[in-house]
Amino acid sequence: MSYSNDNNIQSDYSKQHVHDVEGLVSPAGRGRDRHTHCFETTTGRAIPCRDSHIHEVEFKTSIDDCHCHKFCGKTGPAIQSGFGEHIHLIKDPTSCNDGHRHCVIVATDTEEPIRC
């Protein structure tokens, strides 16, 4: 699958996909307060970036230890995963809630075409 043409503009197909993302944030807290949160979301549509593309990602984590966290960020560029498919990496902190943050380190699933 090609993500750019001769003018470094994404093809119409590559703009029309999203990725599912799910996982756990890094643990935080000490002792009995040590905890993690899970999350599940779908990225926004592809955004052209240099000779690749990225996606915006937003979600709220599960409620654990009486609080949750927000995440608002972007993926890294596409990483070819074989068979014409690709993934993206995400590595950024969550919002600060209850006096701490967690780190999101995860790879997206392969792309899902948007069907109208």
Image: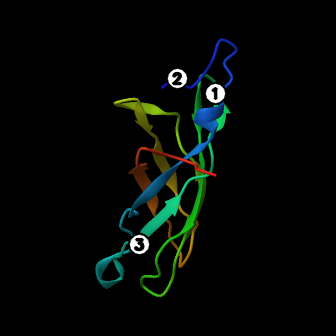
Under circle 1, the secondary element is loop
Q: Secondary structure at mark 3?
A: loop
Q: Residue at x 43, y 32 (%)?
A: 79
| Residue type pointed to by label 3 | His
Residue located at (42% from left, 82% from top): 64
The residue wearing badge 3 is 37
Marks 1 and 2: CB-CB under 8 Å? Answer: yes
Tell which circle, 1 or 2, labels the residue nearer the N-terminal end: 2
Say what secondary structure mark 2 lies in: loop
Q: Amino acid at mark 1?
A: Ser
Q: Position of residue 72 (x, y in %)?
A: 61, 58
Task: Answer with left or right where residue 38 lies relative to residue 8.
Answer: left
Q: Looking at the picture, does residue 62 appear above or below residue 20? A: below
Q: Which residue is mark 2?
A: 2
Q: What's the residue type where badge 2 is placed?
A: Ser
Residue shown at the point (64%, 52%) measured from the top left = 116
Instruction: Depth check: give the residue in front, 36 or 43.
Output: 43
